[in-house]
Structures are given as structure tokens and as C-alpha cells.
Image (cartoon, grey):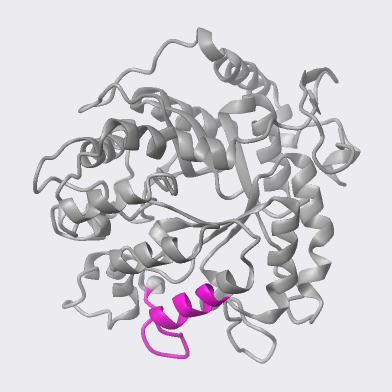
Amino acid sequence: MRWSDSVHLPAFFRAPAALALLALVAVVGCRGAERSAPEPAPAASSFRPVLDSHVHITPSMVGLATALQVFERSGVDRFVVKSAGAVGSPRYRATLALQRVLGDRMRAFAVLDWDGIEDPAFGRKQLPNLERMRRDGIVGIKIFKNLGLGLRTADGKLVPPDDPRLDELFAACGRLGLIVAWHVADPVAFFEAPTPDNERWDELQLAPGWSFHGGDFPSHDELIAARDRVLERHPGTTFLLIHLANYPEKLDYVDRLLDTHPNVYVDTSARVPEIGRHPADQVRAFFVKHQDRILFGSDFIVEGDGSMQLGSAWHVPDVLPGLDDAVEFYARHWRFFETTERQIDHPTPIQGRWKVDAIGLPPEVLRKFYVVNAERLLFREPLPAVFDPLEGMVLRRGPPQHGPVEP
């Protein structure tokens, strides 16, 4: 049954305890200007609250309650979920339910259902789903690294990022105003031999499936080149290339990419360890030069049971991070971007046994990086008119952008 055919929340929201928490979350989400300022995190400055453009929250009430606690303590107000599920899926419907409760505190990206990728008309057949996303207030699609590294056709061949079957899909996103958030490849070290000499050996031991060395995997540079060919073919589509365009190891490349493609934005999610290895003055100059095109993102993950992942799926074996750890995770971001300290801890130690130098961004650049850029790109339109699934009451109205809005 489609979401638009029902006025009911998904089953796990209808339990009495969940409904009580839903009411609580509604109060937290709708207090707006009445909400007191979040408690400052360590090393906090006046640049609060922050808009985190890249989080993953499993749409359960426990998961949301955990996330809101972390955000309140860390100085994060608004956020963007990058994993709303495919159109029609339970995760998609549940994420929409959260968005309708939280209103202008939250936006979301949906994902694609890759079934049927063998069909030459695959891209064109996605148009109804893309139109549905647009009507539902979804801001774009998220493409994970499985395109290029995991998705295969029936003959076992990997589907490359620049597969021509996807051209109509990318073009349609441009016409509809849907942003393409794209994770291509992975850290360069994941494409090198997973031996003790690999600088990400600690992480690869815990997640051996993250090694793309050998076999029929393309190289890191081959994947990046294929992605860049798509950018050249679709100048009318807005791309948000997450993880600093998946090449933070080469800051000069990302600099040229942004110079070449005015329709491209990047975020910093889960890549402070790599960004911070470059000379601080070089990184600061890069952020100043492209101050209108870089978004703050953390890659903070909250599972349905409230367990968390802090920029990486792996930390100390058998030890799950708690609320204080999550607050410290954000505090290390603030310290990196706001101070000029040298050789400090980066947010995710498992991602490399090294220190980083903070870059001390100017106030006007911080404001754009923390808030304004994501506000303009991801919160630029009001949510469509929606109805409370429990009461049938109009919660908020926004002019429909592409045809009538389904209730």
C-alpha cells in the first residue's frame, strides 16, 4: 500500500509508547524560537546552532530520541538524513513521518531501487519515483558506493558510475530540481593492499569488506574519472559530492573540480582525518576560496535501537559509543574548523593513527559552511502541505512545486 493511500503511521509508530514519544518529539521539533539554546559542547564558540547536512537516522522513535539528545548537547539544530530508503519502502514512509513531525528541522534524501538495472530504459522508468520524491518533499537522491563497486548485472559485471542507462535519470533530476548526493569510490587506502603497511589497516581488519584491492574492482582514479564524465554530461543537474568529492587526499583535484563545474557542491562528512593532513594554511585557503560551495556534514549514524556510529562503522571492538562519545565527536569537528591548534585529535581515530592541524576559518566563512550553504541548497523550499496522519489536520503549507501534493 502506498503512503498516499493511507492516513496511518507505520506500525511501530502506532504503539501507545511510541505515540507518547511522538508527541514529545513534536514538541521538541516545533518549539522553534521558543526552544532554549543547545548546551554548548566543549570548545564551543558563538557559531551555533549548526546545520548538519549529512546524517543517517534509522526512523524509529528510539533512534530519533537518541539523535535529538546528541544534537541538543552538541549545538546541532537542523539536519539532513541521507538514507530515507526507496520510494514506497517502509523506511521511506517512516522517514517521511519523522520529517512531518520535525518540519523545518529536517530534510531527507531517498535512494534508488536498482532492480531492473539490466533494462536499457532503466533511467527513464525511474521518472515516476523521482516525481513522487519531489511531491513528498524529498530534496534529492543519494547514490551509494555500490554503484561502481557492488551493483552487478546478470553476467556478473560491475555497473560503472557513468553507465549510459543512468543518463536519463540524472537529466530528470536536473529538470525536477532534485539534488544528486553521490558517494563514489572510498578512501584511496581501501584500494591498496590490506596489509599492516596500509595506513588504514586498523579499520580494514575490522571491516575486510571495505577493501577493494584486486579482483575486478576498478581503481580509485577510474571510478573518479567515470563520475567526472557524468558531471560533464549533465551541467544542468546539481551534484552534492559527499566526502569532499571522495578525493580529500588530493585537495588540488577538488579545487579544480569546483572551478570546472559550477553545479557541484561538496561536504566534509567523515573526511576530517584526510582533510586535516594537508597544511592548515592550504586547507584554509581552499575553504575561503570555495566558501559558497562546501557544506558541513558529519556522517553521524544512529541505528533503530539507539546505537551510534561516529563517522565510521567501526571503533573499538565490542565497545559501542555512548552519548558523551557522540558529543566529543562533534566537539572535535568544532575544534578543527574553529581553532588554530596544532596536532589535535581528529573525530574518528579508527580512520588513521595521526593528528591533524586545525584550520581556524574566518567567522563569515564558518557561517556559510555551518549554516548558509546547506540552508540555500537543501532547505530552499518549504515542505509541501501535509496532513497529520493521526488527526488529519494540516500541519504546514507550502506551495506545491510540481503538480498537486498527495496528502
Residue 56 vs residue 184, the one in the foreground: 184
At 22% from the left edge and 27% from the top edge, which residue is drawn?
42
| Quarter of image, res 7 | top right
Count of numbered badges drawn on the protein = 0
Query: Was residue 225 drawn as part of the magenta stretch in this picture?
Result: yes
Residue 260, compared with residue 393, is above or below; it is below
Magenta range is 211-229
Q: Position of residue 384 (x, y in %)?
A: 77, 32
Q: Residue furthest top?
A: 34
**Left or right of residue 348: residue 102:** right
Residue at the spot x=54%, y=63% of the render? 144
Left or right of 371? Residue 274 is left
Residue farthest to the left? 342
**Is 62 in the magenta?**
no
Left or right of 199, for residue 243: right
Image quadrant in which you'd find residue 390? top right
Residue 150 visible to the viewer: no
Could one spot residue 204 in this view of the protein? yes
Relative depth, front residue between 176 and 95: 176
Position of residue 361 measured from the top left corner of the image (x, y, whole percent): 25, 39
Q: Position of residue 317 (x, y in %)?
A: 28, 55
* Residue positioned 76% across, 41% down in the render: 136
Residue drawn at x 88%, y 42% as measured from the top left:
403
Please state the horizontal and vertical placement of residue 242, each as a whole percent of the image.
46, 56
- On-image quarter of the C terminus: top right
Residue 221, picture quadrant: bottom left
| Residue 75 sits above or below residue 266 on the image | above
Is residue 135 rendered to the left or right of residue 292? Answer: right
